[in-house]
Image (spheres, rainbow, N blue to C red):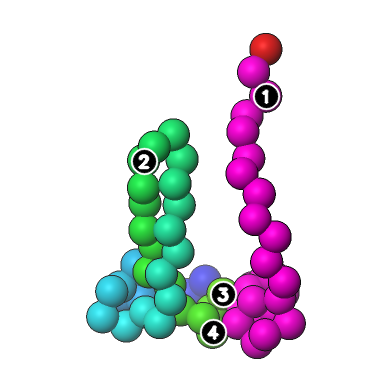
Protein backbone atom coordinates (compact mmCIF):
# COMPACT_ATOMS: atom_id res chain seq x y z
CA UNK A 1 0.00 0.00 0.00
CA UNK A 2 1.38 3.39 -0.97
CA UNK A 3 1.96 6.19 1.49
CA UNK A 4 -1.03 8.25 0.33
CA UNK A 5 -3.36 5.23 0.57
CA UNK A 6 -2.11 4.57 4.12
CA UNK A 7 -2.80 8.20 5.05
CA UNK A 8 -6.36 7.96 3.71
CA UNK A 9 -6.93 4.69 5.57
CA UNK A 10 -5.63 6.18 8.82
CA UNK A 11 -8.12 9.06 8.47
CA UNK A 12 -11.00 6.64 7.94
CA UNK A 13 -10.06 4.11 10.63
CA UNK A 14 -12.58 4.13 13.50
CA UNK A 15 -13.74 7.63 12.49
CA UNK A 16 -17.09 8.34 14.16
CA UNK A 17 -17.86 11.33 11.91
CA UNK A 18 -17.43 9.47 8.62
CA UNK A 19 -18.51 5.93 9.46
CA UNK A 20 -21.91 4.53 8.53
CA UNK A 21 -21.95 1.41 10.71
CA UNK A 22 -20.94 0.54 14.27
CA UNK A 23 -19.80 -2.95 15.28
CA UNK A 24 -20.08 -3.90 18.95
CA UNK A 25 -17.88 -6.63 20.44
CA UNK A 26 -18.60 -8.04 23.89
CA UNK A 27 -15.99 -10.38 25.32
CA UNK A 28 -15.45 -11.31 28.96
CA UNK A 29 -17.83 -8.56 29.99
CA UNK A 30 -15.84 -5.87 28.16
CA UNK A 31 -17.54 -3.91 25.39
CA UNK A 32 -15.63 -2.48 22.43
CA UNK A 33 -17.17 -0.52 19.59
CA UNK A 34 -15.67 -0.07 16.14
CA UNK A 35 -16.85 2.53 13.64
CA UNK A 36 -16.58 1.28 10.09
CA UNK A 37 -17.61 1.87 6.48
CA UNK A 38 -20.08 -0.44 4.73
CA UNK A 39 -18.36 -0.04 1.38
CA UNK A 40 -14.98 -1.08 2.77
CA UNK A 41 -16.44 -4.03 4.68
CA UNK A 42 -18.32 -5.21 1.57
CA UNK A 43 -15.22 -4.98 -0.61
CA UNK A 44 -13.37 -7.35 1.68
CA UNK A 45 -16.14 -9.66 2.90
CA UNK A 46 -19.03 -11.47 1.22
CA UNK A 47 -20.46 -11.96 4.72
CA UNK A 48 -20.90 -8.19 5.17
CA UNK A 49 -22.09 -7.76 1.58
CA UNK A 50 -24.91 -10.24 2.24
CA UNK A 51 -25.68 -8.61 5.59
CA UNK A 52 -26.04 -5.12 4.16
CA UNK A 53 -27.94 -6.08 0.99
CA UNK A 54 -30.65 -8.14 2.66
CA UNK A 55 -29.42 -11.60 1.62
CA UNK A 56 -28.54 -12.40 5.21
CA UNK A 57 -30.21 -14.61 7.80
CA UNK A 58 -29.38 -14.09 11.45
CA UNK A 59 -28.80 -17.01 13.79
CA UNK A 60 -28.13 -16.03 17.35
CA UNK A 61 -25.52 -18.11 19.10
CA UNK A 62 -23.71 -17.52 22.33
CA UNK A 63 -20.20 -18.87 22.11
CA UNK A 64 -18.55 -20.09 25.28
CA UNK A 65 -14.92 -21.21 25.35
CA UNK A 66 -14.36 -24.86 26.16
CA UNK A 67 -13.38 -25.28 29.81
CA UNK A 68 -11.02 -28.11 30.69
- Expressed as whole percent of the image width and height from the top left, the position of residue 40 reads 53, 79
- Above or below: residue 64 compared with residue 3: above
**For the residues bearing labels 4 and 2, Cβ distance under 8 angstroms:** no
Q: Foreground: 57 or 19?
A: 57
Q: Which residues are magenta?
A: 42-67
Residues at discs 4 and 3 in contact (Cβ within 8 Å): yes
Q: Residue furthest top?
A: 68
Residue indicated by mark 3: 41
Q: CA distance from mark 1 to mark 3?
A: 30 Å
Residue located 56% across and 74% down the image: 41
Residue to which mark 4 is pinned: 39
Q: Marks 3 and 2, Cα distance to the nearest angstrom?
A: 24 Å
Residue 66 location, quadrant: top right
Between marks 3 and 2 in the image, the one whose residue lies nearer the viewer: 2
Locate the C terminus by quadrant: top right
Disc 1 + disc 3, Cβ < 8 Å: no
Q: Disc 1 designates what residue? A: 66
Q: Earlier in the sequence, mark 1 or mark 3?
A: 3
Left or right side of 40 for 65: right
- Residue 22, percent from left and from top: 41, 69
Disc 4 to disc 2, how far (Cα)? 28 Å
Say the numbered circle drawn on residue 30: 2
Asked if the residue under mark 2 is in contact with the one under mark 3, i.e. CB atoms within 8 Å, the reply is no
The reply to whether dot 1 and dot 4 touch (C-beta < 8 Å) is no
- Tell me the mark number nearer the camera, choosing from 1 and 4: 1
Check disc 1: other Cα within 10 Å, few if <14, some if 14-19, many if 20+.
few
Helix, strand or loop status at disc 4: helix
The answer to whether residue 50 is visible is yes
Amino acid sequence: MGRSAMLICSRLYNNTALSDVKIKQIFNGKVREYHAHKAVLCLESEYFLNMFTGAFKVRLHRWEPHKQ
